[in-house]
């Protein structure tokens, strides 16, 4: 018996209950199963348990892992992206949640044109103002959207992403998630565009995120357990050198 079957069902039920509390259709919320640090065998079990969309936070790890996984899996990049990995990212991922500068957008756009791929992009916004966080500031978001709307051909901007500050009390994340939703609403009005996607909520705070309008929740630990602090030997640079 695959242990992931009941875990997956439990997470989907919690997402559905949170959606219903907010008078939302649970079908509007997509689970991104975050498999970083876990090997292809975990992805295979997750697919058997009904999961279809997976999130990785490192291009190098994904470049090793994705070819070893069933081709039915869909992949999103959820972690910070360096420009020099863009040409790999646009081939590996259907969506990139972590675009946070005009420079990174430009590099991704030209990489996607060259690769002939059409990934979706989400803009990562630092709504909490924590200096350690990646993401464009809310103040700089309009200029970034303006830049993207003028340059996007291969890439499609579909939404925003944020990470709440780490806090064991999920309610403390609510104002940050609400702020991302309000920003989205303002940007849709200001630019007359549609931004249906809000990527927000992790193991500790996904129910609050769904109540505040999340379209994508990114869940790792609640499905696959605690991650090792140090990457497994199979994921070390030795195994991946030569790929990137
Ligand atoms: C690791 C990670 C997650 C998943 O975190 P959990 O707390 O394990 O659910 C979500 N989003 C990003 C950007 C991550 O890097």
Image (cartoon, rainbow, N blue to C red):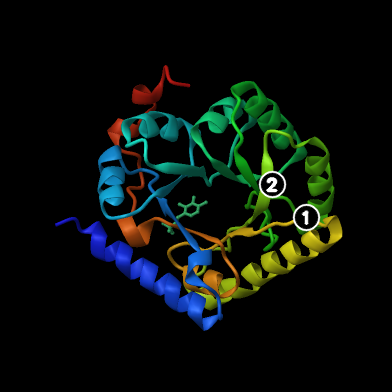
Is residue 205 among the parts visible in the rendering?
no
Q: Position of residue 78 (x, y in %)?
A: 53, 47
Secondary structure under the numbered disc 2 in the rendered image: strand
Looking at marks 2 and 1 on the same chain, the residue that comes earlier in the sequence is marked by: 2
Residue closer to the observer: 3 or 134: 3
- Residue 89 quadrant: top right
Is residue 74 among the parts visible in the rendering?
yes
Q: Quadrant of the N terminus?
A: bottom left
Task: Give the farthest residue toward the top.
Answer: 242
Look at the picture and state if 23 lies above or below 225.
below
Residue contact between numbered discs 2 and 1, judged by CB atoms under 8 Å = yes
Q: Position of residue 110 (x, y in %)?
A: 70, 26
User: Which residue in the protein does label 2 denote?
Assistant: 157
User: Which residue in the protein does label 1 denote?
Assistant: 193
Residue count near mark 1 (Cα–Cα under 10 Å), binned few <14, some 14–19, many ≥20? few
**Distance in Å between CA atoms under marks 2 and 1:** 10 Å
Residue closer to the observer: 49 or 176: 49
Residue drawn at (46%, 30%) of the image: 60
Q: Position of residue 67 (x, y in %)?
A: 37, 29
**Horizontal relation, residue 46 to residue 207: left or right:** left
Residue drawn at (79%, 35%) of the image: 151
């Amino acid at each position: 018996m695959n242990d992931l079957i009941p875990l997956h069902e439990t997470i989907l039920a919690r997402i559905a209950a949170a959606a219903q509390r907010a008078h939302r259709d649970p079908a509007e919320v997509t689970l991104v199963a975050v498999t970083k640090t876990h090997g292809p065998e975990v992805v295979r079990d997750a697919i058997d348990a009904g999961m279809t969309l997976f999130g990785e936070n490192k291009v190098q790890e994904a470049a090793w892992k994705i070819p070893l996984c069933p081709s039915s899996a869909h992949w999103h990049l959820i972690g910070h992206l360096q420009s020099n990995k863009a040409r790999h990212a646009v081939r590996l991922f259907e969506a990139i949640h972590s675009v946070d500068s005009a420079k990174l957008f430009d590099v991704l756009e030209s990489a996607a044109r060259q690769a002939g791929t059409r990934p979706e992009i989400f803009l990562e916004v630092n709504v909490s103002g924590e200096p350690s966080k990646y993401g464009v500031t809310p103040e700089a978001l309009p200029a970034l959207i303006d830049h993207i709307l003028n340059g996007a051909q291969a890439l499609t901007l579909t939404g925003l992403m944020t990470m709440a500050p780490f806090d064991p009390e999920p309610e403390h994340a609510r104002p940050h998630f609400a702020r991302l939703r309000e920003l989205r609403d303002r940007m849709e009005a200001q630019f007359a565009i549609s931004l249906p996607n809000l990527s927000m909520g992790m193991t500790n705070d996904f129910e609050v995120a769904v109540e505040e309008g999340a379209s994508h929740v990114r869940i790792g630990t609640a499905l696959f357990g605690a991650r090792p602090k140090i990457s497994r030997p199979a994921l070390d640079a030795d195994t991946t050198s030569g790929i990137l």
